[in-house]
Amino acid sequence: MQQFLSVSDPEDPGSLVKKALALKKDPFGNQIGKNKTLGLVFFNPSLRTRMSSQKAAMNLGMNVMVMNIDKDGWRIETQDGAVMDGDNQEHIKDAARVMSQYVDILGVRTFPALKNREEDYSESVINQFVKHSEVPIVSLESATRHPLQSLADLITIEELGIKKPKVVLSWAPHPRILPQAVPNSFLEWIKTTDAEVTLACPEGYELDDQFIDGVNISHDQDKAFEGADIIYGKNWSSYHHYGQRLDVKEDWTITNKKMALTNNGKFMHCLPIRRNVVATDEVIDNSIVYQQAKNREFSAQVVLQEILEGMQ
Ligand code: CP
């Protein structure tokens, strides 16, 4: 594998899940990363991605360098050809190329601004890293996708051992405007499995066609939950009314009463989660979110291992 930006990068997502589960049983068995360095560049905050990626790299024998570029770096200019006589001090093409002199793999987290859909969906920041870096790029969540999370989600679902699981990705409330990266990405990864997938969301919260193609859509949360094996809760802002919060009359918070409609369904969420807004304490405390978070370590580890193997 040359890079990891989306489900299109691994040759076979299913075999990546199986390899990750083997690594979970024997995390230190392959020291392919000895004398190699992973760089992690964060334009935005993170707990799980930061710690799980570091842990994964250390499991493989790698060294790790972390740069909080939003706080510790020069202000980055992203426009090609910009006359840099304003506040921005370093061009992304120089920053990306220089960072790639010090590391063997570079992970980048860059959230969307949620102001201009075309700009966000062009993935210009992470694509400029791909263009200018001299080493492979791993997405630590980009404007439209979060593939390390989605791979961890598939690993977690595989561990449940349910044949053809009925999976519902349910929109849930949130006080802030959030990106579509997690739900977009979850859909493109879960569609590679045998799961029956439903997107449950209020009208106006449907995602981009490229992600919902082949997915059942329901605007009735209770109906969608009936008989489900897995409820994946998540908030996102509107794609069609880009970056907006729309008026929603019904209460979409995921409660025990709603979970009771499922087939003894498991609740999943990528975290962080707003307790008693997205889902109630009872739902979260009886969920598999910590198993999911643990699997972030092995999704990162298998991706790093595959990229390192490709360099040999
Ligand atoms: N799920 C996830 O990516 O968590 P962080 O934003 O804390 O890294």
Image (tube, rainbow, N blue to C red):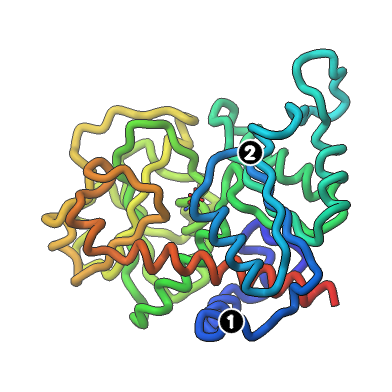
Asked if 63 appears above or below 242 in the picture, the reply is: below
Q: Identify which amino acid the numbered label 1 is placed on.
A: Lys
Q: Quadrant of the C terminus?
A: bottom right
Q: Contact (CB < 8 A) between labels 2 and 1?
A: no
140 or 66: which is nearer to us? 66
Instruction: Establish whether ligand 1 lies closer than 8 Å to the Cβ of label 1.
Output: no
Residue at the image point whose x is 20% and y is 32% from the top? 249
Q: Give how far across and how far down residue 174 sits, in percent.
A: 33, 37
**Residue at the disc numbered 2:** 43
**Position of residue 38 in the picture relative to residue 131 (left or right):** left
Q: Give how far across and how far down residue 7 sits, in percent.
A: 61, 63
**Position of residue 14 in the picture relative to residue 119 (left or right):** left
Q: Earlier in the sequence, mark 2 or mark 1?
A: 1
Picture quarter containing residue 72?
top right
**Label 1: element kind:** helix
Q: Identify which amino acid the numbered label 2 is placed on.
A: Phe
Q: Give how far across and how far down residue 73 sits, in percent.
A: 73, 33
Q: Badge 2: how crowded within 10 Å, few (<14), some, or many (20+)?
A: some
**Label 2: element kind:** loop
What's the distance in space between the residues labelled 2 and 1, CA to CA?
30 Å
Q: Give how far across and how far down residue 33 sits, in percent.
A: 74, 73
Residue 19: assigned label? 1
Residue at the image point whose x is 51% and y is 85% from the top? 25
**Position of residue 278 in the picture relative to residue 90 (left or right):** left
Instruction: Establish whether ligand 1 lies closer than 8 Å to the Cβ of label 2.
Output: no
Task: Specify the farthest residue to the top.
Answer: 85
